[in-house]
Image: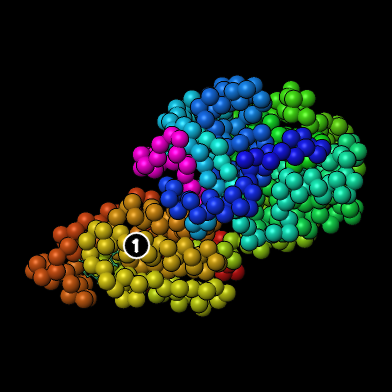
């Protein structure tokens, strides 16, 4: 059952069941097939249930889906730009049938909603990508999800909310559409202009929102997306701390901050229309659409996917139907002579000096610990971001030595560790092959499966250490390229550095050394699957550094590593 309420903001469809019905469904749901919602699906269902996606009443069924993809409209003609679909695995699809009710749960198993299965189908994802995003290029995050990351089967049907998704973070800043409408009504805010963002806010954003509010004679709602944004964006915890600082820059009682649990698709123009509808549902009367709204970045040819003002034009075209006033904005730039911000189209750059710092330049400055000028960012915000993105010499990294047994990995690794300790200021953990096999992988042998598992464990620990600013020195044989690549990804996706060092001492030299007598045993067949003898070693193709200890001392090899680290900015020797 859906509940309709209609204060200013239009019809709001909340899809939660009444308490007694929800309790009954909770009992019955133990018998229903159960689907664990992904992070993206959890975001979608939260906004479906609380009315953020009004007028939708569930995940799209084929008639709505087809028309949304082709014409940006539901089957009944209502404007709706983004397919909200439930993608499931073949295995799950095989277990359910149309007409049935299924349980939708969060990762902890909490029953969020039940769903009437009205349709199960295998969509044409390429058609969806072209229809919605105008491209099949997987450099577009929305397309990448459709073609590479999502599940193959769609299930459509009405949803009925049982439990509100739980958030333990920033509870005081989360409001449903109904709560925001009530808050606006209580405060007498008749005109509210919404500002959407997925980035930290700097002075330019504040200037822009000030102007927008003034122009619309409205109060301001800063409503950043905290669900899922573009991969590589600043995490929402850091951003929200920044927004809280920024909020203090506005005159009291004029501006509100509220977090939106939206999973963005980076769909540019169509996404902007979607954002406008969502803001209307949250009780806003005006919506700021700036340059390149919800832009997905560059395509695989290095070009923009959409024109910079395409989004503005599309929202403008549909503003009456949406029932929201667009406040279009040009890019704001700092004009040196005026010592103030202005929209770029109001500046004559032949007479005045325009100052700008791009996102890329900002990140470079942060990474290298360089100054951020006061005209660009608020010191409190910059300080907050510096905690999240410390300069390189304070960032964590993993040093990953790989090479044959007896190649000198552990010896060099120990020497590097000693030198790092001597330099100081770094917390270093040694994950040497033998050490790991004693403490972390004592039950494992040397089959391919066991070696992979061993390296994955090292990768997991190294990523945890480096993520938190530490240095992890790993020195296993790690004979397989694919597994080493996995470890690199695990570390790099946390933002930490990964430096692969191939200790390429030839087999003959390692065997001649035979410090542990293992090569002799392997040759005699006493030890089986010995790397280099009767087990493979895939040499790295593009390691950051290659060392051969045939003719160099451990000290010299360690020195090479230290110089490499200094060059990369991870340590500062001078
Ligand atoms: S792996 O492949 O990365 O999981 O190996 P690793 O954990 O580094 O363990 C290698 C050490 O185990 C000893 N050892 C063997 N190595 C290779 N093959 C076989 N079959 C084998 N059996 C025992 C050997 O001492 C390796 O130590 P290092 O320090 O590399 O000489």
At 14% from the left and 65% from the top, the residue drawn is: 528
Q: Is residue 243 magenta?
A: no
Q: Where residue 430 sits in the image (x, y, percent)?
A: 42, 73
Identify the residue position indicated by label 1 in the image. 455
Q: Would you say residue 130 is visible in this rendering?
A: no
Residue 318 in view (yes/no): yes
Q: Which residue is more in the foreground, 474 or 238?
A: 238
The segment highlighted magenta reads 86-105
At x 37%, y 64%, the residue is 457
Say left or right for 337 vs 480. right
As displayed, is residue 379 above or below residue 426?
Answer: above
- The 10 Å Cα crowd at callout 1, few under 14, some 14 to 19, many 20 or more, is many
How far across and down, in percent of the image, does residue 425 sit? 57, 74
Q: Is mark 1 within 8 Å of ligand 1?
A: yes
Tell me the quarter of the picture where residue 132 sits: top right
Residue 10, compared with residue 359, is above or below; it is: above
In the shown orientation, is residue 390 left or right of residue 339?
left
Q: What residue sits 54% from the left and 28% below the top?
A: 65
Report which quarter residue 357 is drawn in. top right
In the rendering, at what x and y percent does residue 66 appear?
Answer: 53, 24
Image coords of residue 243 (percent x, y):
75, 54
**Looking at the image, which is closer to me, 474 or 354?**
474
């Amino acid at each position: 059952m859906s509940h309709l309420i209609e204060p200013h903001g239009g019809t709001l469809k909340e899809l939660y069941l009444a308490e007694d019905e929800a309790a009954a469904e909770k009992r019955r749901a133990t018998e229903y097939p159960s689907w664990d919602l992904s992070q993206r699906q959890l975001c979608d269902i939260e906004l479906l249930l609380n009315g953020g996606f009004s007028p939708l009443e569930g995940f799209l069924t084929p008639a709505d889906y087809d028309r949304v993809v082709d014409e940006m409209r539901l089957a009944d003609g209502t404007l709706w730009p983004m397919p909200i679909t439930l993608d499931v695995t073949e295995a799950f699809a095989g277990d359910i049938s149309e007409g049935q009710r299924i349980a939708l749960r969060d990762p902890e198993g909490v029953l969020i909603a039940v769903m009437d299965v009205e349709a199960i189908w295998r969509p044409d994802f390429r058609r969806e990508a072209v229809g919605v995003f105008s491209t099949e290029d997987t450099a577009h995050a929305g397309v990448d999800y459709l073609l590479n990351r999502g599940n193959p089967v769609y299930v459509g049907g009405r949803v009925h909310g049982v439990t509100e998704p739980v958030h333990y973070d920033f509870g005081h800043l989360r409001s449903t559409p109904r709560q925001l409408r009530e808050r606006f009504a209580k405060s007498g805010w008749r005109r509210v202009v919404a500002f959407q963002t997925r980035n930290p806010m700097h002075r330019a954003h504040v200037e822009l929102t000030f102007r927008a509010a003034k122009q619309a004679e409205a109060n301001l709602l800063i409503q950043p997306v905290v669900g899922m944004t573009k991969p590589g964006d600043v995490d929402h915890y850091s951003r929200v701390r920044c927004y809280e600082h920024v909020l203090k820059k506005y005159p009291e009682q004029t501006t509100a901050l509220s977090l939106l649990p939206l999973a963005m698709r980076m769909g540019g123009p169509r996404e902007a229309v979607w954002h406008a509808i969502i803001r209307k549902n949250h009780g806003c009367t005006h919506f700021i659409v700036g340059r390149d709204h919800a832009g997905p970045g560059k395509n695989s040819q290095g070009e923009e996917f959409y024109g910079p003002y395409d989004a503005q034009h599309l929202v403008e075209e549909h503003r009456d139907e949406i029932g929201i006033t667009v406040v279009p904005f040009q890019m704001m730039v700092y004009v040196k002579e005026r010592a103030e911000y202005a929209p770029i189209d109001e500046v004559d750059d032949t007479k005045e000096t325009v100052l700008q710092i791009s996102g890329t330049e900002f990140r470079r400055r942060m990474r290298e610990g360089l100054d951020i000028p006061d005209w660009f960012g608020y010191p409190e915000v910059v300080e907050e971001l510096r905690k999240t993105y410390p300069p390189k010499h304070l960032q964590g990294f993993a040093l990953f030595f790989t090479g044959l047994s007896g190649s000198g990995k552990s010896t060099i690794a120990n020497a590097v560790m000693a030198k790092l300790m001597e330099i100081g200021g770094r917390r270093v953990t040694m994950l040497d092959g033998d050490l790991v096999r004693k403490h972390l992988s004592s039950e494992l042998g040397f089959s391919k499966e066991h070696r992979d598992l061993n390296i994955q464990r090292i990768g997991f620990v190294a990523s945890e250490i480096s993520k938190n600013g530490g240095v992890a020195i790993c020195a296993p044989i790690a004979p397989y390229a694919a597994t080493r690549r996995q470890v690199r990804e695990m570390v790099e996706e946390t933002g930490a550095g990964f430096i692969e060092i191939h200790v390429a001492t030839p087999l003959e030299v390692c065997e001649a050394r035979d410090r542990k007598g293992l090569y002799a045993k392997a040759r005699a067949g006493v030890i089986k699957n010995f790397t280099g003898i009767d087990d493979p070693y895939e040499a790295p193709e593009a390691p950051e550094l290659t060392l051969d200890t045939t003719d160099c001392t451990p000290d010299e090899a360690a020195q090479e590593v230290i110089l490499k680290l200094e060059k990369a900015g991870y340590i500062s020797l001078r």
